[in-house]
Amino acid sequence: MRKHLITGNWKMYKTPKQAKELAQQLKTDLADVKDVDIAICPPFTALPVVAEAIKGSNIELGAQNMHYETKGAFTGEISPEFLLELGCKYVILGHSERRQYFNETDELINKKLMTALKMNISPIFCIGEKLSERESGKTFDIIKSQLNNGLAGIKEGIDKIIIAYEPIWAIGTGKTATPKQAAEVHEYIRDWLKKNCSLKVAEEKRILYGGSVKPDNIDELMAEKELDGALVGGASLEALSFIRLVKFQKV
Ligand code: PGA
């Protein structure tokens, strides 16, 4: 049985002070949640205060990116070692905004995934198609090539990778994929894992959905058995809304 994971991706929002306040409120109001795993991914600058604020709680810490080397002359970059020392359990890799605005390629993401696994940080590996690709019937081809290239050469530790299916046309647009649209792609991903890894990896893999997940659509999305949680941007920035997402109603 796969346990759901609800993850907040705070993107480039929240100063350390604002992040601390939100984390403190989440810690208090989510303390009774046991059946869902919870993670928040604040900006790098807020990781230390958020780590402190959620200490001893059921909320795990994640980062939004990292470099594939652990040290070196890489001005402006963040080493996985820094993340580990701050208590990060997860790191988001290959988010579409990194691919789109910072030219991250499947090959680069592959290197980062390998390093994260070596360092024992669970990557949340994001994949998803653009609107034009969906409209021209290329969704599965894109997903396949992102999986083939992103996971190339990764065998050991593959079980630690969480996959997030995030159709780019649904991110921050208010357009959510229907549960059926999402489930179709999740099934395709699971099938790929079956063929390329093993039945066990496929069955145990948590595949999250991301893209305009909100309090008013979380219940129907999570009712879809293929969806093992959500990666949430906008709706994770307000305590009440994120709390409602974590406490989704089983329908
Ligand atoms: P959104 O972002 O929930 O604001 O659409 C999701 C994401 O980018 O992970």
Image (cartoon, rainbow, N blue to C red):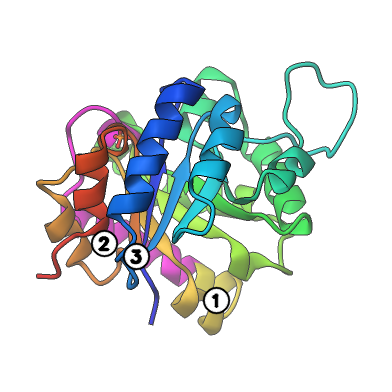
What residue appears at the point 53 percent right and 27 percent down from the top-left corner?
98
Left or right: 186, with 110 as reference point: left
Where, by quadrant of the figure, is residue 47 drawn?
Answer: top right
Q: In this view, does 169 lie to the left or right of 39?
A: left
Task: Please state the extent of the stretch shown in magenta in the rendering.
Answer: 168-192
The residue tagged 1 is 201
Q: Does the magenta stretch include residue 143?
A: no
Say whether disc 2 or disc 3 marks the residue closer to the N-terminus: 2
Q: Tell me the quarter of the picture where residue 51 sits.
A: top right
Which image quarter holds the N terminus? bottom left
Q: Distance between the residues labelled 2 and 1?
A: 18 Å
Q: Are marks 1 and 3 in contact (CB under 8 Å)?
A: no
> Foreground mark, 2 or 3?
3
Q: Which of marks 2 and 1 is nearer the N terminus?
A: 2
| Label 2 neighbour load within 10 Å: few <14, some 14-19, many 20+ | many
Q: Is mark 3 on a helix, strand or loop?
A: loop
Q: Name the residue under label 2.
A: 183
- Which of the labelled discs sits on residue 228, or is there none? 3
Q: Place residue 35 in its image quadrant.
A: bottom left
Would residue 10 be seen by someone viewing this image from the given angle?
no
Placement of 157 over or under 10, stated as above or below:
below
10 Å crowding of disc 1: few (<14), some (14-19), many (20+): some
Label ID, residue 111: none
**Three-letter residue code for mark 1:** Val
Q: Residue at x 84, y 39 (%)?
A: 70
Q: Quick one: label 3, few (<14), some, or many (20+) residues within 10 Å?
A: many
Front residue of this view, candidates 121 and 34 = 34
Q: Where is residue 154 in the image (x, y as percent from the top left)?
A: 71, 61
